[in-house]
Image (cartoon, helix red, strand yellow):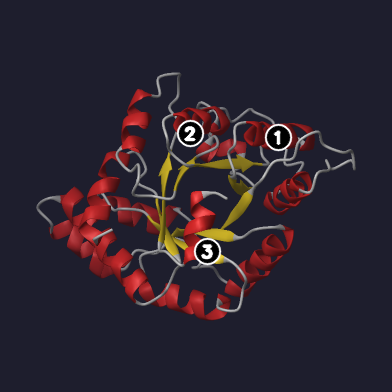
Amino acid sequence: MSLLEEAFKKGDFAITAEMAPPKGTDLSHLIECAKGVKGRVQGVNVTDFQSAMLKATSLATCKVLKDVGLEPVLQITGRDRNRIAIQGELLSAGVFGIENVLALTGDYTGIGDHPGAKPVYDLDSVGILQVASTLASGKDMAGNDLNGVPEFYLGACVTPRYDPLDLQIMKMKKKIKAGAKFFQTQGVYDIDTLKEFREKTKDLDAKIMVGIIPLKSAGMAKYMNKNVPGIYVPDELIDRMKNAEDKVKEGIKISAEFIRRIKEEGLGEGVHIMAIGAEKNIPLILDEAGL
């Protein structure tokens, strides 16, 4: 059983932190950032060619992090692989003892640094969850028996601020049916959005980890409001960032306040912190939040 699954079963407030592999082979900075949260989080998510950008693979990076004593969460998208490659990647994760898997459909290649790359999308996030569940049962997608069976704790993503929200909930139900046990949300800054989402999903059999993206500036907040689907930063937080002398410190404080409120009001079974290039600040967020 993975540390993340164990935390949920014990009723603990679970924490995961996102780490992006580098464009290259030097993982030293990522390893140091990950070591900074060792023993304080139940999982370290490793992005899979995030935003369709070429990086070292999630699987290789997960293996490196596992070897230094961290619990990885393998992210895998359907954008770059057909069903054979997806199954091979999942089996390889099983070989390495990587249990946590987050299934994603993947951003379109046109937004990345190789816009001419051909997208695959043989399987979407639901399909990846289904095939992972199938492999864990001892069969491949073609019905062939496996010699050795992987163990997975499966997750997916959801966007709480979405119109219509019922469509996101419909997708959540499909993902749960396909094997998802936990969800990590898009970044949330608005408590009312989160309350509405949790009210509408309270009967679903899955754990919810609320996405936390620390703000670095008022400009960052305005950019996300304008360009990132599902993100809404309230004006009061933008004003706080604009007026703060130390923008980074204020962003850390805002994130910590929100995490404490999530925990105190039972609005999530955990949080997923996405520091986006400032992973070294994750321990500071945890300190400020009292975690």
Pointer 1 with pointer 2, Cβ within 8 A: no
Give the farthest residue toward the left.
245
Q: Tag 3's secondary structure? A: helix
**Depth check, front residue: 98 or 21:** 98
**Number of marks:** 3
Q: Is residue 114 above or below residue 136?
A: above
Say which residue appears at 79% left-offset and 49% top-offset. 137
Amino acid bearing label 2:
Lys
Give left or right: position of 172 versus 288: right
Q: Give the labeled residue for mark 3.
A: 9
**Depth check, front residue: 70 or 185:** 70
Q: Tag 2's secondary structure? A: helix
Amino acid bearing label 1:
Leu
Q: Tag 1's secondary structure? A: helix
Amino acid bearing label 3:
Lys
Say which residue appears at 51% left-offset and 40% top-offset. 51
Q: Give the labeled residue for mark 2.
A: 66
Q: Quadrant of the C terminus?
A: bottom left
